[in-house]
Image (spheres, rainbow, N blue to C red):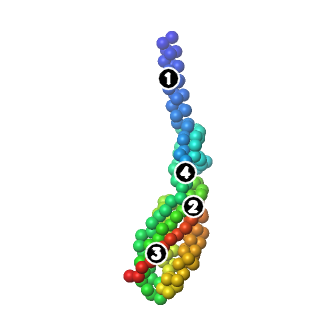
Amino acid sequence: MAGFAIFVFLLMIFSILILLLSVKVVPQGMEYTVERFGKYTVTLGSGLNIIVPFVDRIGQKLNMKEQLINVPSQEVISKDNAKLAIEAVIFFQVTDAAKAAYEVENLNNAVLNFMKINLHTVVGTISMDQLQHSYGEINARLLDDVREATEAWGIEVIRISYTKSEI
C-alpha cells in the first residue's frame, strides 16, 4: 500500500510539472514566438497560452508597443559641401513578431544602422538652403525610405524626427 501511495504522489508531482511547463502567460503588449525542435511554429499573443512541454520552447519575446531609437549625432555633408551634425529619433512598432524575430539578427541595431546610412544619403543630395526650408519634405523622404526597407523585418516605422546644426 505504501508503494502505491508513493506512485500516486510522484504521478501528481509529474502532472503538476507538466502543467507548469505547458502554460505560458504572455503579458499585455508582448508576443512570444514558439519553436518546435528549433523551428518557428507559432506566435503566442497576450494572455494564457498552452504549448507542448519538452517539444516546444519560447523562442523570442517581442515588445509590440511603440518604441523609439535615438540616432546619435552624425556628421554629414550636404550637396553644397556644408558640414552638418544631424541627430534623429525613430519611432517604430513591431507588426509581425515572427519576421522581427527571424528576418534580422538584431532589430534595433539594424534599424539604427539603416537610418544612419539613409541620413547620409538623403542629406548628401540636398543643399544647405533646402535643408533649412524643407524640414517636412525631408522627414517624409526619410520616412518613406526607411519604411520601405524595414517592412521586411516585420516593423512599421511610424515617424522620424531629426535636428541639424552646422559644424
Image depth: mark 1 or mark 2 in front: 2
User: Alpha-carbon distance for marks 1 and 2?
Assistant: 47 Å
Tag 4 secondary structure = loop
Name the residue type under label 2. Ile
Q: Which mark is residue 29?
A: 4
User: Alpha-carbon distance for marks 4 and 2?
Assistant: 15 Å
Q: Residues within 10 Å of mark 3 (few under 14, many from 20)?
A: few
User: Alpha-carbon distance for marks 4 and 3?
Assistant: 30 Å
Q: Earlier in the sequence, mark 4 or mark 3?
A: 4
Circle 2 is placed at which residue position?
A: 155
**Measured from the top left, where is residue 12 in percent x and y?**
52, 24
**Measured from the top left, where is residue 132 in percent x and y?**
49, 83
Tag 1 secondary structure = helix
Q: Which mark is residue 163?
A: 3
**Measured from the top left, where is residue 54 in percent x and y?**
54, 38
Question: Could you tell me which residue is drawn at 48 percent across and 68 percent down?
Answer: 89
Image depth: mark 2 or mark 3 in front: 3
Name the residue type under label 1. Leu
Q: Earlier in the sequence, mark 1 or mark 2?
A: 1
